[in-house]
Amino acid sequence: MCRLLGAVFTETGSIEHHLLNSECSLFTQAFKGGQSDGWGIGFYCEGSNPIVFKSDKPVYEDREEFEKAAKAAKGRIIVAHVRKASNPRGLTREMLISLENSQPFNYSKYVLVHNGTINIPDEVSRRLGPYASLIKGRNDSEVYFYLLLSLIEKEGDVVTAFRKVEQTLMEIFAEEKVSRFEKPFTSLNTIFSDGSRLYAFARYLYNPGPSMCYGDTPVYEMCFKHNTDHLVVASEKTVRGLWVPLKNNNLLVCWADEGELRYRVLDFNV
């Protein structure tokens, strides 16, 4: 199970505190949860495409580089990830761990971090058309990234793509008559950006227990907190206080507009 963090600012900002220094920082979460399979930070500085720092090392054994990246990551949109590798193909660890398999994944103006397992990566890859050639690693989350991009191209809208991604996976699962898994995925929990807006999607099919740091929320339930100039969304809260839960099958959309922070939560259950 991976851990995710993202933020939107009305002006250039930093999430160094949430990454490193808070009581339940992303670094602390990785240490507590054994997210030992790589880390990454992506941010939009100048220009439309994200800058990405990644490592295939456990973040708690790579603290100096993680600190450098956390301090350098300043922008209006920032995402971060610590990885605990999923392995639906049954690959060796040597095949799973590499820079190509670490998150965030980025292509053109898009960046994504994901927590969960896509159980049918090969079946999905066969349906991606030209996007299949962009896959660099063996991470099932990378397949999910390009599936989402293909749906954005097809639908012309990010929100509609998120609405349709589960249905698409279910259809592929049924058409391919997959029998080795009960479902095509475990969780689609995602933080995603196109450079102008940040999207956080909470979607999971089961919940294995309480959150790691405080133990007061389901482990797959995401949350966010905001004030007048920024919003932070995470797999679980990094500090105590008032966080708004992002319930199952909800999509958070947030952006800055002329110095004003704006957001909305869409409930895909209705």
Image (cartoon, rainbow, N blue to C red):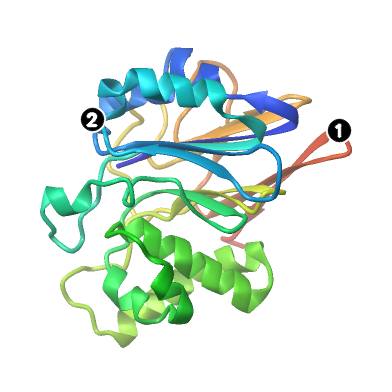
Residue drawn at (30%, 77%), measured in percent from left and top? 123
**Regarding mark 2 in the picture, which secondary structure is present there?**
loop
Residue 74 falls in image quadrant:
top right
Residue 173 falls in image quadrant:
bottom left
Expressed as whole percent of the image width and height from the top left, the position of residue 135 reads: 38, 65
**Quick check: 184 left or right of 254?**
left
Q: 208 or 226: which is nearer to us?
A: 226
Residue drawn at (37%, 57%), measured in percent from left and top? 141
Task: Please state which amino acid type lies under the numbered disc 1.
Answer: Gly
Mark before the other along the chain sequence, 1 or 2: 2
Location of mark 2 (residue)? 34
The C terminus - image quarter: bottom right
**Quick check: 216 left or right of 177?**
right
**Quick check: 207 left or right of 44?**
left
The N terminus - image quarter: top left
Instruction: Tell me if mark 2 has few (under 14), some (14-19) or many (20+) residues whose alpha carbon lies within 10 angstroms of its own.
Output: some
Residue drawn at (40%, 53%), measured in percent from left and top? 204
**Regarding mark 1 in the picture, which secondary structure is present there?**
loop
Expressed as whole percent of the image width and height from the top left, the position of residue 36 reads: 24, 33
Instruction: Tell me if mark 1 has few (under 14), some (14-19) or many (20+) residues whose alpha carbon lies within 10 angstroms of its own.
Output: few
Q: Which mark is residue 128?
A: none
Q: Is residue 219 visible?
A: no
Expressed as whole percent of the image width and height from the top left, the position of residue 143 reads: 38, 65
Residue drawn at (64%, 54%), measured in percent from left and top? 194
Q: Is residue 253 visible?
A: yes
Location of mark 1 (residue)? 259
Query: CA separation, marks 1 and 2?
Result: 39 Å
Task: Please state which amino acid type lies under the numbered disc 2.
Answer: Gly
Residues marked 1 and 2 touching at CB (< 8 Å): no
Expressed as whole percent of the image width and height from the top left, the position of residue 84 reads: 27, 41
